[in-house]
Image (cartoon, grey):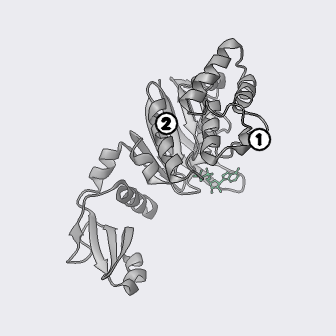
Amino acid sequence: MLMEIHQVSKQYKGAVQALQDINLQLKPGIIGLLGPNGAGKSTLMRILATISQPTSGMITWNGADIRKNPDELRRALGYLPQDFGVYPHLNSTEFLEYAAALKGLGGRKMKARIMEILELLNLQHDLKRPIGGYSGGMRQRIGIAQALLNDPKVLIIDEPTVGLDPEERMRFRSLLTDLSGERIILFSTHIISDIEATANQIAIISQGRLLANSDPALLLRNVKGKVWSVTIPDQDIQEARTKWAISGAIRREDGLQLRIVSNEPPLPQALAVPPSLEDAYLHVRALGEGA
Ligand code: ADP
């Protein structure tokens, strides 16, 4: 089971270069696509979901070009777009039966499958309630439910944690782990903590370019010995921002305690601290965007 992205670029009308020469391999596991707003994450996901075409480059699914045979991938695909809409008056089973019919799935087996999915997503207690009254987290789970109807080998979820409260966000992370296994799960986010606990591969994208693609441990190793803690007077913060890559700031009684990513100690009194993924992300972006 392998999805390969070869030299994919996408240029929208109006000359927006949304993706530039992306090369990436996706194997079973949880892959976090991390990048700031406007980086090109949704564009890439729409292309992988066969909704949109690259301007150049090619995607293969198990070695075959998806442009030549999109249905092969579509049968194996579950996709939750960012702007997923529901029919608010339907209840969960009605909605999922409708979604299944649109995908050409149906029959008695499908009813059992829908119940199974609702239980997996912990939605089995609200069968009669119209979806319109659901919380953000429940709506998002209904969105994932429709993406799971065909038991997909490839699950693509675009910014699933937007609008979720911290508890729902945590629940989403454990759901991702429950869903993983013999499946490729690609999800996008601009929030590092969403990825930290779940992803075994992190692809960092910014300004349409892939800046890094590795496992979290390697990303951390690359920034080891380059993260510093130093406290500065409050009024020096503007100058500090121009001089250093700052990954965090905490107000203390004696000033602002900064986390700084730098090859050398930023100030003689700076203390080296263990790196976090947040530091690694900042480091990768500083290197990539400066290039
Ligand atoms: P992300 O999902 O990382 O926020 P997007 O893929 O949505 O990024 O957008 C990447 C870039 O492409 C942005 O500059 C965005 O404004 C632009 N873009 C996205 N969709 C379109 C479109 N349909 N037409 C023109 N430009 C677009």
The answer to whether residue 163 is left or right of residue 24 is: right
Q: Helix, strand, or loop for circle 1? A: loop
Residue under pointer 2: 175
From mark 1 to mark 2, how far is it between C-alphas? 24 Å
Give percent across and percent down for residue 104.
Answer: 73, 20
Camera-side residue of 2 and 56? 2
Q: Looking at the image, can residue 72 be seen?
A: no
Q: Looking at the image, can residue 106 be seen?
A: yes
Give percent across and percent down for residue 75.
Answer: 63, 22
Give percent across and percent down for residue 69.
Answer: 64, 23
Residue placed farthest to the top in the image?
A: 108
**Residue at the spot 38% in from the left edge and 84% down from the top edge:** 234
Residue placed farthest to the bottom in the image?
A: 235
**Residue at the spot 60% in from the left edge and 29% down from the top edge:** 118
Report if the beta carbon of the residue with label 2 is closer than 8 angstroms to ligand 1.
Answer: no
Camera-side residue of 71 and 185? 185
